[in-house]
Image (cartoon, rainbow, N blue to C red):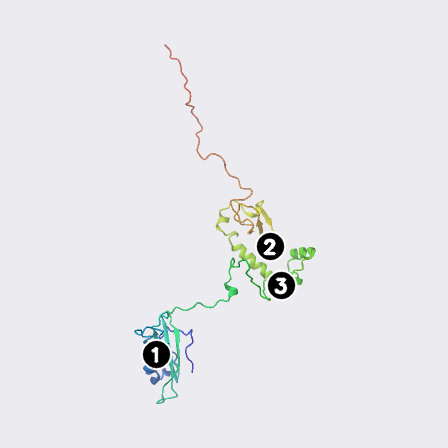
Amino acid sequence: MTSPGAGAPFEDAGQPGGDAAHLDPELAAAVALARAAAEEEVEPGAEPETAEPVGAHVGVEAEGPHAATHFFESNYSGYVGWRWAVTVASVGPGEPVTVSEVVLLPGPDALTAPDWVPWSDRVQPGDLGAGDLLPTEPDDPRLVPGYTGGDDPAFDEVATELGLGRKRVLSLEGRLEAADRWHAGDFGPRSEIAKMAPATCGTCGFFLKIAGSMGAAFGVCANDVSPGDGRVVHVEFGCGAHSEVEVDTSSTVPVAEIVYDDTSVEYEPRNQ
């Protein structure tokens, strides 16, 4: 015998579930027994005396040839849309009907908690504050052991020259993830400010190309008046602070080609 789980659907409540032929008439008729079991389950004092925690009967569902579950509306405060599910059973025709289980389950319109998301997936950029620690997993695919070289020759050369000997370095997957994130971010070529810029960062004198394979597409902005100052920017990003921007300083007021000077008056003698 089984009973409906917490995630069981209720769209067909009121209609026999499964094979309708397996719904024992004696079990289907045990509404009063099921209601009494649900009422016994109600915590004393949980609701006002005038309230009926167990509401109307809303359906019965077969759990097999010897079991069925009755559903009742719940009038518990804070459990709107939930239902009492009472599973009753019998070993055969003419045998006593007994109660197997009483649970409170969410209906199709019930307010339930969202699906659990691990903390590591809930952390967003900017959530890490001063003193916070966010360790990486030992098998993080974005990192590889330093002795493997990190499959980036440019970084390997620098690390060897300086003797850094880092324990782990970025893997190819880690670099690709970072590139996708930076490309789609606020300082990528698709941002609104980049679309309106007069030129791109790749042609700007304030653009500092980063080392390694990522340098083909990314660098750091060194212009203190740019919104990207100190940020990783895409070579196709741009802003109004481009080093080669030229501003038209001519007057915006139209001037006629013929100018009349009316500050002085010339007299012509009249012929007598």
In front of the other: 188 or 131? 131
Label placed on residue 144: 3
Q: How many marks?
A: 3
Query: For the residues marked 3 and 2, what is the alpha-carbon distance in whole angstroms?
Result: 17 Å
Type of amino acid at the residue the image marks with label 2? Met
- Residue 137 at x, y = what percent? 58, 66
Query: For the residues marked 3 and 1, what is the alpha-carbon distance in whole angstroms?
Result: 60 Å
Type of amino acid at the residue the image marks with label 1? Glu
Q: What residue would you read off at disc 1? A: 39
Q: Earlier in the sequence, mark 2 or mark 1?
A: 1
Q: Earlier in the sequence, mark 3 or mark 2?
A: 3
Q: What residue would you read off at disc 2? A: 214
- Residue at disc 3, secondary structure: strand
Q: Quadrant of residue 269?
A: top left
Q: Earlier in the sequence, mark 3 or mark 1?
A: 1
Q: In which quarter of the image is residue 172?
A: bottom right
- Residue at disc 1, secondary structure: helix
Type of amino acid at the residue the image marks with label 3? Val
Camera-near label (3 vs 1) is: 1
Q: Which residue ends up furthest to the front in the rendered image?
A: 45
Q: Which residue ends up furthest to the bottom in the rendered image?
A: 94
**In this picture, is 93 found above or below 55?**
below
- Residue at disc 2, secondary structure: helix
